[in-house]
Image (cartoon, grey):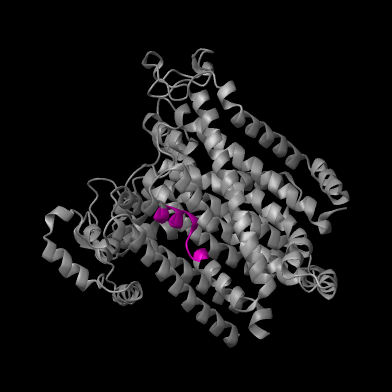
């Protein structure tokens, strides 16, 4: 297993190098001079300033040298200046990151809480009405674009029934002392139940819209993996021992069925990261996804570059964790 | 030919896939015939019928699905929007499949440095979530139909390459390939005549399922204002424009959304049916 892990790590380093090259090229391919883009209004800067920055960022050097400069700065967290904020990109990202992280994690948790039990249930009731209904819902979940589902949720639960808020992270007038930037966590830590309730309500609709496709795919995968596991000899043996169907399913089949599901969930995190750009726009969620879309419209290339880099690195790391988890969970890989 | 008949028979037996196939064919026909079928010019507005409701909500048959905020006929815009979605879906998938298959064949057949470089490119591009990559690229290239096709293809070839490379690694060790080599066939001939036909079923299934992904991507980009620009009708753009009227004129956003779901669902069902029909292990 150690050899497999080392191989995986070395591949990760190559992939990270590739990501850096592509993200580096983003700013170089963008129309206009990179320094003028960093300065925003080129007219505000003198020629001497432009030349100084050009030298400082190594833009007067050959492209490979520029790339090394870029990597050196990126490693230190220097991703340039956000044109519209006139602040370092890394600081702007740090401000918006907790909102996106909270929404993504909440959506993932919500999706898994729904998908895993339903997937197991559908497999245990194979061929029943429940199973057919579940399959139909899965198909719908996979076919519904997140932004359209978001709009439907806004229309139904936000505007028609008026049960849940449809924009922002917390109600106006609700005070919350920020500790981590994760509102649920902050309100729990400070025992601020009013803020907790408000933050929870604000999270529900965007998390549902974002997690629906992930939940549908996970449910489909769980069902297939459970059906596969339920056909194994050890399940026949467990049944022969007289164990209840529930114990057989949860204690024996599910443990093995979860192994392939872990891989699918890891891959789905990528879809969640992409999805939050659209969902945050629909729900006016003050996170990185919406910020990125606004940055694209404002031609704030350094900020777009920084966010895309962060998303790609996050996705790679999540996949690495998933792979390691897969190796740990799967006895065939662990022992072999 | 005999295999085609078997696949066709399997597809016809799978009712969901058959219905989905017919629905898709009708949708494509409607999109192609949009200039004839559309009752009005999709770009021309008439403020006297601004926000007119659909026929089931008290509207008239002159505008069966109502009108938008500029008095443009929703049905006509839906039909013309289908052309954009289906065009982008098909062109991107064809280009991605061609590029991905070619690179996958090269990587799988030659191995060595060729495989390492292509696989590295595949791994790197896979690290970018599709929509994140597309938004980043659209930021650089700017909005527009050609740029959407280019952006989605730049990332779309990756799964094809991965699948074809894997299949090629298996097929290249088969006896018919060894026999062709022994008879003195060149690499080009072996790749075209011996390996390509064996990997095509996987490509076909992936292509069908990828159309759905590409249509959702195009709609998402248009929804964010990064796709095809107004006034050209696109389903994603129509949803975005209708959002401001969602409470009282819900159909403006909902109808294009339903159209997207119908196409994506049909494509997914048809793709699944095709996968089952092409997989001999799943036949009776």
Q: Percent x, y for residue A89?
A: 26, 63
Task: Tell which of A42 and B162 is nearer to you.
Answer: A42
Residue B134 part of the magenta-drawn span: yes
Question: Who's the residue at 67% across and 31% down the image?
Answer: B26
Vertical relation: B112 (above or below) A90: below
Residue A155 part of the magenta-drawn span: no
User: Residue B184 is drawn in which quadrant?
Assistant: bottom right
Looking at the rendered structure, the number of numbered marks drawn on it comes to 0
What span is in magenta? B125-137
Quadrant of the rendering where the C terminus of chain A is positioned: bottom right
Vertical relation: B7 (above or below) A21: above
From the viewer's perspective, is B189 left or right of A8?
Answer: right
Vertical relation: B213 (above or below) A47: above
Q: Percent x, y for residue B121?
A: 53, 68
From the viewer's perspective, is B11 left or right of A172?
Answer: right
Vertical relation: A22 (above or below) A277: below
């Amino acid at each position: 297993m150690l050899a497999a892990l080392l191989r995986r790590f070395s591949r990760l380093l190559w992939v990270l190098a590739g990501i850096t090259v592509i993200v580096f090229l983003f700013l170089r391919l963008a129309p206009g001079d990179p320094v003028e883009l960093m300065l925003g209004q080129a007219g505000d800067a003198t020629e001497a300033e432009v030349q100084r920055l050009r030298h400082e960022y190594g833009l007067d050097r050959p492209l490979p040298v520029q790339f090394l400069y870029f990597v050196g700065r990126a490693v230190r967290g220097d991703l340039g200046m956000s044109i519209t904020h006139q602040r370092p990109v890394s600081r702007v990202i740090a401000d918006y990151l907790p909102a996106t992280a909270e929404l993504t994690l909440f959506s993932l948790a919500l999706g898994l809480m729904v998908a895993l039990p339903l997937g197991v249930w559908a497999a245990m009731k194979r061929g029943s009405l429940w199973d057919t209904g579940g399959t139909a819902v899965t198909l719908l979940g996979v076919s519904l674009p997140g932004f359209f589902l978001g709009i439907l949720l806004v229309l139904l639960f936000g505007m028609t029934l008026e049960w849940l808020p449809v924009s922002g992270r917390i109600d106006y007038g609700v005070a919350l002392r920020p500790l981590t930037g994760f509102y649920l966590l902050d309100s729990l830590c400070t025992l601020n139940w009013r803020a907790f309730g408000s933050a929870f309500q604000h999270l529900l609709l965007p998390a549902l819209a974002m997690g629906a496709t992930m939940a549908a795919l996970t449910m489909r995968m769980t069902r297939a993996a459970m059906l596969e596991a339920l056909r194994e000899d050890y399940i026949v043996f467990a049944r022969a021992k007289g164990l209840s169907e529930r114990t057989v399913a949860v204690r024996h089949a599910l443990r093995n069925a979860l192994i392939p599901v872990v891989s699918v969930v890891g891959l789905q995190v990528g879809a969640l990261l992409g999805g939050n750009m659209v969902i945050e726009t629909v729900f006016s969620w003050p996170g990185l996804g919406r910020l990125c879309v606004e940055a694209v419209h404002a031609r704030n290339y350094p900020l777009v570059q920084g966010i895309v880099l962060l998303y790609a690195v996050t996705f790679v790391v999540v996949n690495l964790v998933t792979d390691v988890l897969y190796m740990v969970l799967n006895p065939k890989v662990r022992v072999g | 030919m005999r295999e085609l008949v078997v696949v066709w028979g399997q597809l016809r037996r799978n009712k969901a896939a058959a219905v989905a196939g017919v629905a898709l064919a009708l949708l494509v026909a409607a999109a192609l015939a949009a200039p004839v079928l559309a009752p009005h010019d999709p770009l021309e507005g008439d403020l006297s019928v601004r926000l007119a409701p659909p026929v089931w909500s008290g509207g008239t048959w002159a505008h069966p699905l109502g009108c938008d905020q500029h008095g443009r006929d929703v049905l006509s815009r839906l039909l013309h929007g289908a052309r954009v979605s289906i065009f982008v879906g098909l062109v991107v998938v064809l280009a991605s499949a061609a590029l991905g298959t070619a690179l996958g064949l090269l990587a799988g057949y030659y191995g060595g440095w060729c495989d390492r470089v292509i696989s590295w490119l595949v791994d790197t591009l896979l690290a970018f979530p599709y929509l994140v990559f597309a938004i980043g690229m659209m930021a650089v290239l700017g909005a527009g139909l050609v740029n959407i096709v280019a952006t989605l293809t730049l990332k779309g070839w990756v799964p094809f390459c991965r699948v074809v490379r894997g299949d090629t690694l298996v097929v290249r060790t088969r006896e018919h390939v060894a026999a062709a080599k022994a008879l003195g066939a060149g690499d080009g001939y072996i790749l075209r005549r011996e390996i390509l036909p064996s990997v095509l079923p996987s490509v076909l299934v992936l292509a069908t399922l990828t159309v759905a992904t590409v249509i959702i991507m195009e709609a998402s980009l248009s929804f964010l204002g990064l796709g095809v620009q107004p006034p050209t009708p696109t389903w994603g753009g129509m949803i975005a424009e209708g959002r401001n009227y969602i409470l009282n004129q819900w159909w403006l956003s909902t109808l294009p959304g339903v159209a997207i779901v119908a196409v994506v669902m049909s494509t997914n069902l048809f793709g699944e049916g095709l996968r089952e029909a092409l997989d001999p292990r799943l036949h009776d």
